[in-house]
Image (cartoon, helix red, strand yellow):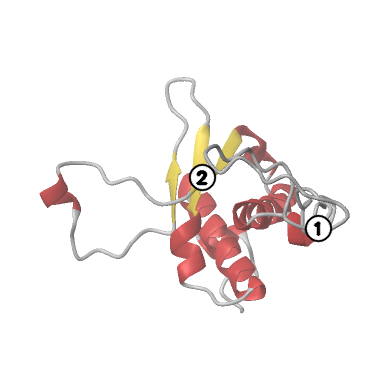
Amino acid sequence: MDNPVTPRDAGRPGPRRRDRHGRGMRGPVAPPQVPLAASRAEVFADLVQDSVERLERRWPQLADVDFLVLEVPRLDGAAGEAWSDEPVPLGGAVPSQDGRRGQVVVYRRPVEIRTKGRDERAALVHEVVVEQVAELLGLTPETVDPRYGED
């Protein structure tokens, strides 16, 4: 052996700063501007935003409404009373009151569970947004969006 390698002290392992091939940490899989880099939550929020923009062209009063995306609906009440046979809601609407803006909420996980692909998810998100806006404005969903229910 021409180049003796001094063994590392077996008693104290040192921090590993690089992978075993000496190349360092890996970077992101895709650059941030590529759709692959967007998380499922970000993609879902974009679907909701697209639906809202479609409706705002026809209903300018929606500029005074906040649109939110939450993971799952919140259970109110005691644990024994909260579980019932009612289906899990896909969205909700809170009218404006006491100086607070109106809100439309879309629940991401229940919508994702009920859909298989991006197109089906986009259609269901739009249906949920239209239904909640209709409830908030006191109109029928067909009045809010004439193409409602055509898919």
- Cα distance in 3D space between marks 2 and 1: 33 Å
Q: In this view, does 100 lie above or below 51?
A: above
The N terminus, quarter of image: bottom right
| Residue 60 in view in this figure | yes
Query: How many marks are shown on the rendered structure?
Result: 2
> 79 and 32: which one is in front?
32
> 113 and 98: which one is in front?
113
Residue 104 — which label?
2
* Residue type highlighted by circle 1: Ala
> 140 and 75: which one is in front?
75
Left or right: 106 with respect to 79?
right
> 28 and 16: which one is in front?
16
* Residue type highlighted by circle 2: Val
| Numbered disc 2: secondary structure | strand
The quarter of the displayed image where residue 122 is located: bottom right
Q: Is residue 129 above or below residue 85?
A: above
The C terminus, quarter of image: bottom right
| Numbered disc 1: secondary structure | loop
Q: Where is residue 47 in the image (x, y as percent from the top left)?
A: 66, 58
The residue at the point 11 percent across, 50 percent down is 80
Left or right: 105 with respect to 42?
left
How many residues crowd mark 1 within 10 Å: few (<14), some (14–19), many (20+)? few
Q: Is residue 151 above or below residue 79?
A: below
Q: Mark 1 points at which residue?
A: 30
If you read the primary sequence from the N terminus, does the residue marked by circle 2 or circle 1 appear first?
A: 1
